[in-house]
């Protein structure tokens, strides 16, 4: 062909595989892509063995609390819908190792939000600095450590606190705002058509989105934050499963939790529920 060059010929061939102007209006789908998010692990565990014991915990009122995977997942789902309902996107956590902390990690992730868990052993000034720097719009706090937020509350009176009483009761006098938030979220889901996890973001929209901002304890300077992505947390959890050899033998694994969950958000360990662990809180 006169005037034809190798480049122009390749361009004409490639044009046969490119969308026409009429097709360009069609949105590109990604149905074949599975976004990696550790939040999906809990939904999966509840579907596989809903009645298996997931959590064993001694509460602040001296009771032994046991929750199955379906109960664990339902409470995380309730919190997720509560956060969605109130438009809360960046949620702080100030608590020791409790079921509420574990539920919050999955609930915040399932709502599409970002969690900012803080070391409750830090000075009040550092805690205030972290939550302000991270721009949290709400804080889930254990009742025992609520006083550490006095300074933050004075400076940020519009940021709501969701207080957990860490008891074996989910309603009534012994329950607290955290349990009420969970129930409110479950009611909100029911009124909206009972979509369950399908109405949430358990598998996230983009695995490179932020899921958490863990902070250092500020031993040499002010605490510093690091962004965790859904993909990074997912792969870290699987890496720990392989390295630790969990569920390698027959029978069910049990994990005695001794390290604080605020260390690296607990993602590398708490997400091991993908292998149907039983959580024993120390």
Image: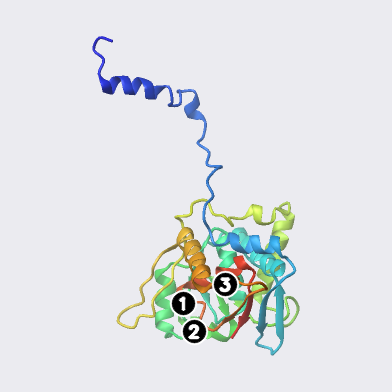
| 282 with respect to 20 (left or right) | right
Q: Residues within 10 Å of mark 3 (few under 14, many from 20)?
A: some
Nearest to N terminus: mark 2 or mark 3:
2
| 79 with respect to 35 (left or right) | right
User: From the viewer's perspective, is residue 58 above or below residue 245?
Assistant: below
**Residue reaching furthest bottom?**
62
Q: Which residue is mark 3?
A: 246
| 247 with respect to 188 (left or right) | left
Describe the element under mark 2 as helix, strand or loop.
helix
Residue occupying image coordinates x 68% and y 83%: 167
Q: Which mark is residue 59?
A: none
Q: Which mark is residue 148?
A: 2
Residue 88 image offset from top left, x and y in percent? 55, 62
Q: Which residue is mark 1?
A: 263
Nearest to N terminus: mark 3 or mark 1:
3
Note whether residue 82 is visible: no
Residue 47 image offset from top left, x and y in percent? 70, 60
User: From the viewer's perspective, is residue 166 above or below residue 41?
Assistant: below
Give how far apart the Cα atoms at labels 1 and 2 are. 18 Å
User: From the viewer's perspective, is residue 64 above or below residue 265?
Assistant: below
Say which of marks 1 and 2 sits in front.
1
Along the line of sight, the residue nearer the viewer: 14 or 219: 14
Query: The N terminus appears in which quarter of the rendering?
Result: top left
Along the line of sight, the residue nearer the viewer: 149 or 219: 219
Give how far apart the Cα atoms at labels 3 and 1 are. 21 Å
Residue 23 image offset from top left, x and y in percent? 50, 26
Describe the element under mark 1 as helix, strand or loop.
helix
Say which of marks 3 and 1 sits in front.
3
Give how far apart the Cα atoms at labels 2 and 3 are. 37 Å
Query: The C terminus appears in which quarter of the rendering?
Result: bottom right
């Amino acid at each position: 062909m006169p005037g034809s060059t190798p480049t122009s010929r390749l361009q004409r061939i490639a044009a046969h595989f490119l969308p026409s102007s009429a097709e360009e209006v069609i949105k590109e789908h990604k149905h074949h892509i599975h976004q990696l998010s550790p939040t999906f692990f809990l939904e999966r565990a509840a579907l596989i063995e809903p009645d298996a014991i997931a959590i064993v915990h001694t509460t602040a009122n001296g009771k032994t609390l046991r929750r199955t995977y379906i109960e664990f997942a339902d409470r995380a789902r309730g919190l997720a819908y509560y956060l969605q309902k109130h438009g809360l996107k960046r949620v702080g956590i100030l608590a020791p190792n409790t079921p509420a902390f574990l539920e919050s990690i999955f609930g915040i992730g399932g709502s599409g939000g970002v969690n900012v868990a803080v070391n409750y052993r830090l000075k009040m000034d550092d805690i205030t600095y972290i939550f302000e720097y991270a721009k949290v719009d709400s804080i889930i706090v254990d009742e025992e450590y609520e006083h550490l937020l006095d300074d933050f509350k004075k400076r940020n009176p519009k940021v709501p606190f969701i207080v957990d009483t860490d008891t074996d009761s989910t309603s009534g006098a012994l329950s607290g705002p955290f349990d009420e938030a969970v129930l409110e979220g479950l009611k909100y889901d029911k009124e909206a058509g009972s979509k369950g996890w399908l109405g949430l973001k358990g598998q996230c929209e983009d695995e490179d989105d932020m899921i958490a901002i863990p902070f250092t304890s500020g031993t040499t300077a002010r605490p510093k934050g690091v962004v965790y992505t859904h993909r990074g947390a997912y792969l870290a959890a699987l890496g720990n499963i392989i390295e630790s050899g969990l569920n390698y033998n027959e029978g069910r694994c049990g994990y005695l939790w001794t390290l604080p969950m605020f260390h690296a958000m607990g993602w590398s360990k708490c997400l091991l529920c993908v292998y149907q662990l039983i959580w024993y809180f120390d």
